[in-house]
Amino acid sequence: MERALVVGILNLTPDSFWDGGRVHGVEAALAAARAMVASGAGMIDVGGESTRPGAGEVPPGEEMSRILPFIEAAAESLGVPISVDTRKAVVARAALDAGAAVINDVSGLAHDPSMAGVVAGSGAGVVIMHMRGTPETMAGLTDYGHPGADVARELRGAVERALAAGVDPAAVVVDPGLGFAKTPEQTLALLGDLSTVTALGYPVLVGPSRKSFIGRVAGVDPGDRLPGTIAACVMAYLEGARIFRVHDVDPVVQALAVARAAGESRTNRSGAA
């Protein structure tokens, strides 16, 4: 089984649902990122705009002022690639110029018509996520016949549009968007049917970290959702996901290492038989 890549979340925002406002200043951000790398993160995903349900859009200048000083300081010293969680082409371009390597666009390149061109022209990696509408409107856009099949179909369309704009297929990662324009029940159904997304043929990233679907099942607040996050990551790994965007790096790295080792042991036993 393939080794998992764990991506540590670094939100430089005052209003993210879990860790907003916890990190202040470049040195604190660097310390947080280094701690995640030491725990096993193979990439750091930095964001300057919350995409929690109902969140409003942040002006590009403000978003850049939050993330660019960190990227400039971290690009040469951190030792792992930096991805940037943004929907705006101007922010993406500045972040890539500052040293970022990947653009993580929760809108699937749909929010800004110029985004695909920025990615294509830079040769950067890109995470194309499934979402309907915007963070402000997505809660009302949850009409699915079959969550797994519908999400896979819509993601395929987003990828095809990116490729038509010149994005390199080898640069593409897809994200089913757990919790984005999906009820908790739909998110759980999607998590259990993730093979519909892995069948697209691109690496799959999932971001279940401390989200509301875990709270719906376990009846706990975000601060108590780490066990559910670990369970969701292992479930997604068994369904074929290989990239995991999380707040809590060390426990997820450990859990996925065990899942991989157990899977390889089972494969070896089957081969020996």
Image (spheres, rainbow, N blue to C red):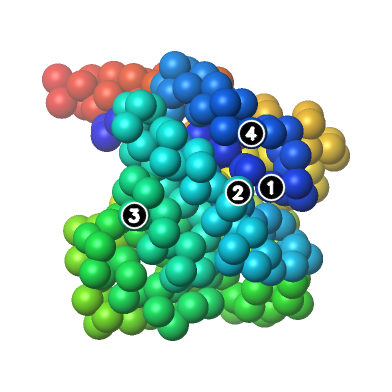
Residue beneath label 3, please? Answer: 97
- The CA distance from mark 1 to mark 2 is 7 Å
- The CA distance from mark 3 to mark 4 is 21 Å
Residue beneath label 4, please? Answer: 25
Up-down relation of residue 83 to residue 58 (above or below)? above
Q: Secondary structure at mark 1?
A: loop
Residue beneath label 2, please? Answer: 66
Q: Are marks 2 and 4 in contact (CB under 8 Å)?
A: no
Q: At x 25% / y 69%, what residue is drawn?
A: 120
**In this rendering, position of residue 36 left or right of residue 74:** right
Residue 271: percent from left, percent from top: 15, 26
Q: Quadrant of residue 169?
A: bottom left
In the foreground, 205 or 273: 205
Q: Are marks 3 and 4 in contact (CB under 8 Å)?
A: no
Q: Is residue 178 visible?
A: no
Q: Quadrant of residue 221?
A: top right
Looking at the rendered structure, the kind of residue marked 2 is Arg
Up-down relation of residue 145 to residue 56 (above or below)? below
Residue beneath label 1, please? Answer: 13
Q: At x 57% / y 33%, what residue is drawn?
A: 26
